Amino acid sequence: MSDAAGSNGAAREYRIGELAEAAGLPVRTLRYYQERRLLPPPRRVGRVGLYSEEHLARLRVIGNLLERGHTLEGIRELLSAWEQGRDIGAVLGVEKVVTAPWSTEEPVTMTLEELAGLFPGQVNAAAVAEAVELGHLTVDGDRVTHWSRRQLEATVALVRAGVPLGEVLAVSRRLQHSMDELAAMFVRLIADHVVGRLDGRDLDALTATLDRLRPGAQVTVEAGFARAMDRQVRAALDRTLGGLAASGDG
């Protein structure tokens, strides 16, 4: 500990090596944070830089945010909001609502052999690689985890009904692209007409509003897809019956 932290009750101060040790980080990481403007410069006494307890607290906040999946750029923005007098808890409340998982699917883990048993003759290295690329599967040695038990069961049902696994994966790729576009539209809608309208300083109101909108977005997509399926199934049935009638007339 530096001499500036004496025994007279003054606030503790750290040289950079001492701060790194207290934070459990390499010195090069602290220097990198300073370069990225995540960590304010130290107080200078001659050629010696002295860091305060506030620097240590800031490093612990950065560590917590990194563990929660934030990027360094995102952390810099959060810390900037904190410096401007906003409650970091309120800022993180918004972040929690926005980034909380929208999916409540249950993953399922099995061996590669068990997976192959669900799709006899159709699971090969190419199919597994495509499923991994789509985000359906993660592979750990000879075990795989599918992100959704319900989606896996639906895929098994389609394949057993006669749809090739490759076709299911191809449709899944197109569906994922469509879902990304749909999600992007909802994000733009909320960003332009909800977030932009609220006072950015009233983070509690923003958090509550975003939390209320989550179920509405999901219901809109589910109801819209169900209605589209009704239309498409009826149209397909009409075509099939029309073809049978034409065949009978012949």
Image (cartoon, rainbow, N blue to C red):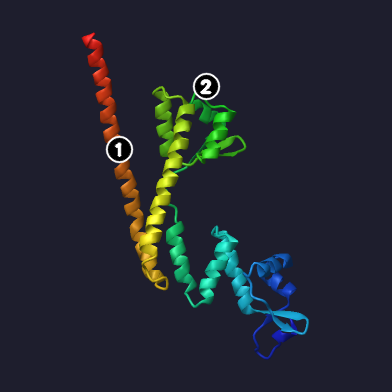
For the residue labelled by badge 2, is the local secondary structure a helix, a strand or a loop? loop
Q: Position of residue 38 (x, y in %)?
A: 62, 69
Q: Is residue 28 left or right of residue 210?
A: right
Q: Amino acid at mark 2?
A: Gly
Q: Quadrant of residue 68?
A: bottom right
Please say if 129 is above or below 5: above
Left or right: where 197 falls relative to 46: left
Quarter of the image for residue 2 reads: bottom right
**Residue type highlighted by circle 1:** Ala
Q: What residue is disc 1 on?
A: 228
Q: Position of residue 246 (x, y in %)?
A: 24, 14
Q: Where, by quadrant of the figure, is residue 190 drawn?
A: bottom left
Percent x, y for residue 34? 67, 70
Image quarter hosting the C terminus: top left
**Marks 1 and 2, how far apart in space?**
33 Å
Query: For the residues carrying marks 1 and 2, which lies nearer the camera in this image?
Result: 1
Q: Which residue is mark 2?
A: 121
